[in-house]
Amino acid sequence: MGILEVKGVNKRFGGLQALGDVNLSVAENTVHAIIGPNGAGKSTLLNVLVGKLIPDSGSVMFDGQSVLGRKPYEINQLGISRVFQTPEIFAELSVFENVMIPCFAKRDGAFRMHAIGDVKHEADIHDMAAAILEDVNMIDKRHMTASSLSRGDKRRLEMAMCLVQEPRLLLLDEPTAGMARADTNNTIDLLKEIKEKRDITMAIIEHDMHVVFSLAERITVLAQGTPLVEETPENIKGHPKVREAYLGEAQV
Amino acid sequence: MLGLNKKDFGLLLLVAFLAVAAPFLLNPFPESSTLSFLNAGYPALMQLFAIFAIVLIGFNILFGLTGYLSFGHAAFIGIGSYTAMWMYKLLNFNVIIAIPMAMLVTGLFALVIGWISLRRTGIYFSILTLAFAEMAYRLSYSVLTPITGGETNLSPNPAKDPMILKGEDGLTVPHLFGFDLNAKQVWELGNWSFTFEAGYYLCALFLVVSFYISIRIFRSPFGLMLRAIKSNNQRMSYTGLNTKPYMLAAFVVSGVYAGLAGGLLVAMDAQAGAERMFWTESGTIVIMAILGGVGTLLGPILGAGAIKYMEKILSSISEAQLHTWLGILPDWLENAMVYIMANFFVGHAWHLTLGLVFMLVVIFVPGGLVELGQRIATKLSRKKPDVTPAGENNPAE
Amino acid sequence: MEEFIQQIVNGLDRGSAYALIALGLTLIFGTLGVVNFAHGALFMIGAFVAILMGDVLGDIRELGSADDFFKLVQVVEDPTQTDFLGRPLAVETSYWVVWFGENVGHWLSDWSVPIAVVVSIPIMIFIGWAMERGLIRHFYHRPHADQILVTFGLAIVLGDLIRAMYGANPIQAPMPEALSGPIDLGIYLGYDIGTITYSAWRIVYFFFSMSIIAAVFAFLQFTTFGMVVRAGMADRETVGLLGININKYFTLMFGLAAAVAGVAGVMFAPIQAPSYNLGMEYLVPCFVVVVVGGMGSLPGAVLAGFLLGIVQSFASLPSWKTGLVESLGLDDTNLLANLIIGVDQIAIYLIAIIILLTRPRGLMGRKGVMED
């Protein structure tokens, strides 16, 4: 029984079957990659997992609780965090403030009114934020405005914002899309480091096979909205069905 | 001090000083001088400065921090005014009842309107608030006339209204525990004359308190959340934060500020009219916010002051005055200039100047007066080599 | 049933105005992505072109009106008559009468509003062109809030320019005498005489706006220009990538939208005497129309325009309201009863709120437009 169980999920957009009978089980404390050619339904699946889309049928269970019908913030409160294709950070705020916000969410839950307090006096929040910035080697950049960071640092910051909440499942939507090779390798190292340091489950959606094979322990191949194979990385390489899915696409 | 850091406390002191010393500061020219028309130290005008500064401080908590543009804020001023007026009519003229009630009732309205309007974002939110304000305006002119007085405005009528707490010979003007708010003290000093009015100082007190609260909100975790909502709403949700209650709280707080202002307007002048609620009035509030500097602490006060001052000065300039100023020009040019100025830019045409100034600000200095000041300050400090440029990204004051 | 039809007909003129303004707003929004708060001002300027032409062409003069400015009159002293001070009476005669004779002069004066439609088109296109080139263009890449604010500022400026020239009071524009009477529509529909009557000019206004709408749609449908514009509305970037200088089209688009609002205003001047405030008065309902129709949907704007015009007309019909109040057993002093009676004032806003909450994309809009 995995921490995330997707059973029989279907989603149609008009005449397009975006997801057809998707079953997926992500085991706890593993890195599970979901790959597939363009239009295979990877992003749709991810949006279902985070509550942005509601499937037509099927169930998505996280740690025994249904995810469906919950709002994104409620799903996050269950312990699922998400990293976006382009880093979604608070661009106008400083790096430190960026990290403080999830610290507040971690400490106070979805909403708590501190209208008259002072951010500067929240010692525990400061400690939490400083610790995570140490962790991702960004403590010296804490006064910078987030929008002025490099792409790789933005990714790092976003990761820190997710990690500070100690999620049990981290969803990564093409974390290295559009990155230079060096930044990609940095991100891989960062993810490995994160994985070593704590108990966390990761589900990665990725195009870049270099990233997938450096990180993943299990790989699910999605094609035309249905999972084709679920295997270890060694067995995926050269798998006939996978070749068909990818090369078939190339011919079109 | 007071839970503020040094810089913020300095700002608070500055505002408190400006508020207390306004009767002097705004009357720099002797009565007899030709520049005396530039004076603004009259109680009625200073009250407006303070009251609109309060509206703007509240509006800034909503628009400045969260970026949600409400185009119906004037309705809250109107609701506050009507509530305060009804307190006069039903109970008595003590503003200690009228003003808190104005805040409370406006807060309730803001809660309902905000709860509905905040289901949408962006322009849709603006249009929803606009629709509510227009409804309030139109209803107060038509079927709600028994409550609002319609076109004739609402004013107390000691002979008819119940005024159950007034007592036999209680005051029939707004007062604070029997202290008449219109009480004035005039101080003649040579050619100068300074007027100190109780009502103005009540407004000033509320202004300073409002400003203090707004600083606290800006620096609080709540303020941080609001800025984060403006920056990236999506990330807020995926961080496990429910943005709706934060937004609603900001909306209600800003509504309460407007209600307080409405109550104060009625405390200064015991009448309330629906024209305060027309949507262009809400537009003027937005203009003030932009002119001052959105999302800054001092911006709202500067913006409200600048617009109200412009309104007063521009609308008071007469053709005769223009003739004296432009007297050195050749006659034909003088007449042409006076004609153009008098018909298009000053007197009752001052709105045109306002619109132009506003457009220029939006086009060239989107950050308003505060940004302008900062730009000038950096320019000046660059000339002195030993001054380091202003510090990192503190939220602008 | 007669009453029902009468109310539909009554809603048509206002609905036509809404539809025309909303059409222009949507054209601008759809192509340029700009929310134009100055669009009501364009409608108002159109109405004042009608006033201007009324002055220029008019053969009957009121002395001392605010718009002496544009009089085209010959002043001749008539020694046979004297004014109240005993001086020879100054007789003013329109030059049109002097030049072309009594008949033509009078005809020109009588038909000044329809003539103003023709005159207004180049004026409005020029104003639209100038607005786009001089102002709006620099705001394409600024946030929507900035666009709203700068056009709002422009609306104030335009309104007060008109006030500076024409004063604050509404000025009535004359409608042609031939069209000023009522028409009995009931007869054509088989009802008794006098059951459904309507002012002839308002009917003209309705058909006029229908033909403008048809012309705009045909223009967009059948010309290359229209094709580019429609493509731009669907996907602006791609059209730009095709090497088409889309900015040129957009300038013209803005001119077209301004002209539509302008002619709508010209023809509306005899229905509602315009004041400088007319623009602000119509802007908010027209935004409601655009939102109800669906942001960016042209047919939606037209449909919602007429729909809301008719809704407003029904909301002002007293019979059903008093009926409802009675059946609810409310007396006159009850707040709810008063709200029901006053629903005509707020009907369109109520609809806007309901639509925005239940179907934010509007009647015919696409999903997700302007959500952020």
Image (cartoon, rainbow, N blue to C red):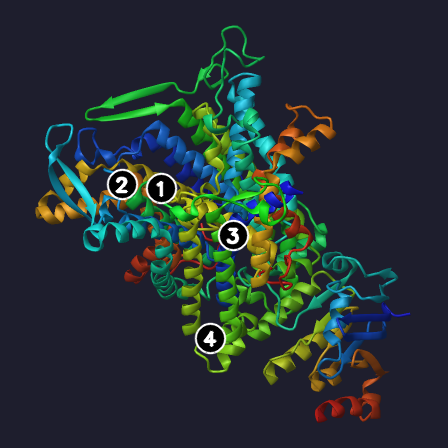
Q: Nearer the viewer, residue B339 or C73?
A: C73
**Mark 2 element type:** loop
* Label 4 vs 1, first from the N-terminus: 1
Residue beneath disc 1: C171
Mark 1: secondary structure: loop
Q: Give the residue type at disc 4.
A: Phe
Q: Is there any visible trace of residue B225 in the rendered image?
A: yes
Q: Earlier in the sequence, mark 3 or mark 2?
A: 3
Q: Is residue C280 above or below residue B147?
A: below
Viewer-nearest residue: A17 or C313: C313
Q: Residue at x 19, y 24 (%)?
A: B190
10 Å crowding of disc 1: few (<14), some (14-19), many (20+):
some
Tag 2 residue: C66
Nearest the eye: C263 or B215: C263
Where disc 3 sits, the SS reads: helix
Q: Chain of mark 1?
A: C
- The residue singled out by tag 3 in the image is C18
The vertical placement of B144 against C313, above or below, is above
Other residues around mark 3 within 10 Å, as few (<14) / some (14–19) / many (≥20): many
Q: Are marks 4 and 1 in contact (CB under 8 Å)?
A: no
Q: Which mark is residue C225?
A: 4
Q: Amino acid at mark 1?
A: Ile
Placement of A249 over or under C40, stated as above or below: below
Quadrant for residue A166, please give it. Answer: bottom right
Residue that appears at 21% across and 28% down: B31
User: Do tags 3 and 4 sit on the same chain?
Assistant: yes
| Separation of marks 2 and 4 at Cα, in angstroms | 42 Å
* Residue A77 sits in quarter: bottom right
* Spatial separation of the CA atoms under disc 3 and disc 1: 21 Å
- Tell me if label 3 and label 2 are in contact, CB under 8 Å: no
